[in-house]
Structures are given as C-alpha cells and as structure tokens.
Image: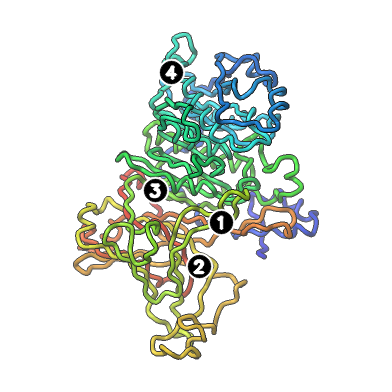
Amino acid sequence: MRRFHLPRSLALLAVVATVAPACRGSLQLTPSDAGTVLAQRTLEAPDPGVAGPYAVRTLYYGSGTDANRPEYRDSVTITTGSVDASKLVDLGSSAESRNEYWGFTPEEFPLNARVWYPDGDGPFPLALVVHGNHDMRDFSDPGYDYLGELLASRGIILASVDMNFINGGIRGENDGRGWLLLKHLEAWQGFDADPDNPFAGKVDMTRLAVMGHSRGGEAAPLAAAFNRLPRYPDDATLEFDFGFDIRAAVSIAPVDGQYLPTGRPMPLENVDYLVFHGSHDGDVTSFHGLRIWDRLKYTDGRDHFKSAIYMYRANHGQWNTVWNSYDNGPRSPRILDLRYLVPPADQRRFAELYVTAFLEASLKDDPRWLSMFRDHRVIGEWLPESMYVTRLQHSSFRPLADFEGDVDVTTGSADGVTLRGDSLDTWREERLLLRSSNRANTSASQENQALRLAWNNRLAGPDTTRMGPPARYEIGLPAGLAAEWGLGGEHSLDLSLVATERLPGPRRPPETDDDDDAAGGEGRRGRRGRPDPDAPKPPVDLSIEVEDAGGRTASVPLSDYGPIRRPLEIHILRRTDQETRDPTEMVLQSYHIPLSDFAESTPGLDPARLVAVRLVFDRATAGEVVVDEIGFSAMGPDFWRARVR
C-alpha cells in the first residue's frame, strides 16, 4: 500500500481521514507526476475555458403542460409537440406508476430542453447534451449549466435535453435516448425555419453536435449512427428520415452495450469524437467509451479526429452539478470513499477546457487548440492538478499493425508488413480487458486486440551484471510501401502504449542453450534475481528507431513524446475488503513522433524509403509494455502548433 502526503486538492479532506474508521485506512493512490508533466504551457492560444465575447441568454422549450416541471409548464418560450417513442422505450412493470406520475405515456413523450444561447445575430452552431440515468424525481437536465454558460458565451448554442421521464429503474432504453436527440434536432430545424420563432435564422443546421453523459454518453453516438440509417434496426416498421449534418459527438463517462442493434455493437462512422472518463467512477466503473472510440471508423476521405482522455481521481457525478459527488444515489456516501476525488470545480474545469476546444475545432473550424488533443502537456498550466492518459487518432492514420486481422503474429495489417521479435521474454497478441463489465450481461472486453512485449536484457547466471543485446520488436515495411503512402516530413509515426507492473527475470545467455540451471531453470527466463513484486518499479522507457532502404537509421526516446506510465491505481470504496474489481484500468497513451524528428537526427534519412520501424528496449533493463495501433498519419500543422521538447 502506498502512503504519502495528500495532493493539494485533497488537503482540506485530511482531517476527515484522521477520524475515519480504521477500515478506510490510508489513501491508496499512484504518486502524482503532475508537478513535472503539467509544469508548462507551450500552446500559444487563449484559454478555451474562459468566457467569450457574447452575452448569454436562456430560455425553455417544451410541452407547456408538464405536471412536475414548472419550467416546462409555466416558463416555456417555445411550445413543442410530443413524439411516439413506444417502439423504442418499454416501461415494463413500472408503466402504470410512471405514467401516473408524469401524466403521459411513451406514445406522447414531450420535447423539453433548457437552452443557453449567444445574444447575437448568428447563425450559431448547435450542440445538444443529454444526461444519463438517475432518480427520475431528482431532475438531471440543469446539471450542465456550466457548459451552457461557457459555450453560449463563445458563440455555440447548447440545449440540455430533458429525459428524466425515462430515468429510474427501466432498462434497454438507450436507443430511445438517441432517437429522442434526433427528434429534438427536428424541432430545432423547425425553430430555425419559423420566422416567428426566437431562433429564426440563428441556428447553423450544418454545424451540429450531440453530447451525453453516462447512458446519454452512449445515446449521443447512437444518435449519430441512427442519423445515417433509413430504418430502426430492431423494428424496420419504424422509418428514420433524419440526415442531419452532425459533425461531432461527445461522450462523458459513457456506458456501452446497453443497446445492441440486432445483438451487435453499433458501428459509428465519420464524425469527430471526444470521450472522457474518470478513474474513480463509482457508477460506470470501467472506461467503456474506449470501445466506442475503437469502433469509430473514417471512410469518407475527409478530415476527422477522435480523442479519448482518462482523468485520474475524477468520478461519475461531478460532470453534472446536480449529481455531484454521489455516484450511486443517496447510499453512495456510505459506500464510496469520497476522499479520493478531485474537487468538483477541477473536474468541471477539465470538461470546460476539452469540450470547448473540441467544439471550437469541429463546429467552428477553429484549429488553435488541436495540439492539446495530441499532447495534453502543451496545456499543463491550464489543467487541474491530476494525471491524464490521452489517445488521439486522425482520419489520415494508416496502420502498419493494429493486431486485429488474424492470428498470425508475424504479419501486420498492411499487405507485406512483417513482424519480428528478438530477445524478448514475452511476445503475444491478446484481447484487452476492462477492469469490470458493470453488468452481468455485458462483456468486460475492450473489444480490441493489442500486442504484449516483455524483456530483460540482463543475462542469468552467477554474474548477473552481464547484459545481452537490447531486446527489440521490428515492423518490416515491404519495398515501395513508404513511397506508395507518400511518407514525408509532414507525417508522424504513431503508436499507443502502456507499461505494466511486470518485470521478467534475467534471460538465458546464448551460450547455454540446454543448461536450464544456468538460465535459472526457466529456459529463456531466469528465476535468480527475480525482483520483489511489491518493490517500487523502475521507470520504463524505450527507443523508437526507423531505417530506410539505404541502411540509414535514426532513433528517439519515446518518453520525449509523452509520459510513459504503468496503469494508475484505483480504489473507490470506504471498506477495502469490499473492493472486488481490478485496481487498475488498461488505458494506453498515444504517442506521435514526427518523421522530421528522425530526419533531423540522421541527415539523409529518407522517409519515403522506410523499410523498418523498431521498438528497441535499450532504456530500461527490464519491463513489459502493451502496444497498439502502430502506423503513420498526416494530421496537419495545426495539431503540431505546440510541442513539448
């Protein structure tokens, strides 16, 4: 168990810790590296979390007859009709009591929302946000006010959609949530076209985003997918006729797999996508959004990007000002150890930074903040003091090896690409797991294959100071592939990686092929000198090397392009004996290395003639890493506006 001084953001809670029951013990956290990782800001752009030039106005639209929500009864500026969601939402055994409480059935669901909008002529981009599941009487839609105020001040309309009437104890309604978002977009299309409407001519219906939190975080990409379909996948008698210009989707701590069209995960294509999740989420306890991120494909040849961010010590509820710290309803103070959490203002500050920068880029074509998605260190001084794991992929990405295609570990994803390991302790491809499934009928798989490599350069035997040649893993490019892909200085070599806790023992010396004793009795893996599993692990680093057809090689340290960490430690319950989930989540960090960096270090190196990319394990004696998505992309100069060198 790690015991250390609390970070500044937890200092005010230290008194609570001293009087807590003994079963709670000391906080178990990965020591923070924020002091070095977030030590600077190299991005020369204004803070996207600061209010913009527009005065902010608000209004409500809705039925005008709501029995429980006075704002949707007495305060509506725009009266909307109802929609029939009965083919998508089943209230089950609670139908009678729910219909009595709300005063309507799924055949007549209202279209209610609260809106923050800029005081100006427009037209302005439009984003819809929808909450997730919660006590249906503790209304969730006001909880994104902080985003509404900020986005509207910067020239983006935000409508927080009311779906409290499908909150509570029902299941399997996320397709309904996604469909309802699209019905709201239909209403907005009417607002913009009606000369008597306050939004007449003020909505840019070619610049739309859908966002959601928790179940809403699955509903938003479902809406983007439904938007392109002609009919409802599970009942084709329900016709879809949407076709909106949805450019972007945002998922905040989403579930995934609650809705499986025809029993399969919902595919998603050709939208910009942002997903983020907190490590100490006491409700959606795994980063399910990684599966949505991985399923998203780009097929239209246009510029898109997707970003996934993991925030250490963030929870589920603090993204919403109504939900706040209690992730499992009123009981959560008794079961969750709230001492671990970042302050609510810090968690929402992160959301303000990234949601605003994302929508500015996607909806307003403003690229000034794109480099913060490539490398979060470039805005270190803006970010709350915590740790972050970030992934980015641009639509130009072309994989050499994504480990998805077959079971042959010697072949890559592109034709003719070969894979080879040398002096490795472990070399295998495997399916990554989430730390929990959340529900018994939901898979704990990340639905993603990756590569696991382990090494120890020390040689077993009486003299364990002897070192063999560094272990390495090579991706071989067939002749002409680099030229065919047009590789040049504007491209980057991309990969995703995380280190693990494992340290293999020394490897067998090459001169003792049949002597198990000399190798420690484990063939290539020696037992002698095996480290204490509870001892602190040394840092992990490695070199990334490329070679061209002329035999010229160039190498850079991977750590120059982002922090290399082991999975972050997670404990969320007050009673340690109740912790049953894996104490870590396998979230890989993206690294993007400009090919021009290799060319600078080795004059004459020709990116258009590359024949090999290598992971060379020469910067740490022993370790293990999980690697994925090795390939090239051409993100463009805006993603490289700021660098940390």
| Mark pair 4, 1: CA separation | 44 Å
Q: Farthest top residue?
A: 196
Residue 423 location (% of width, % of height): 39, 77
Residues at discs 2 and 3 in contact (Cβ within 8 Å): no
The answer to whether residue 487 is left or right of residue 347 is left
Q: Amino acid at mark 4?
A: Lys
Residue at image position (43%, 29%) is 208
- Tell me where residue 323 sits by quadrant: top right
The answer to whether residue 475 is left or right of residue 78 is left
Q: Which residue is mark 3?
A: 393
Among the two numbered marks 2 and 3 on one chain, the one whose residue lies closer to the N terminus? 3
Residue 241 location (% of width, % of height): 42, 25
| Mark pair 3, 1: CA separation | 20 Å
* Picture layout, residue 544 above or below residue 489: below
Residue 34 location (% of width, % of height): 54, 54
- Quadrant of the rendering where the C terminus is positioned: bottom left
Q: Helix or strand or loop: what does disc 1 sit on?
A: loop
Q: Looking at the rendered structure, which numbered label has been put on residue 202?
A: 4
| Mark pair 2, 4: CA separation | 54 Å
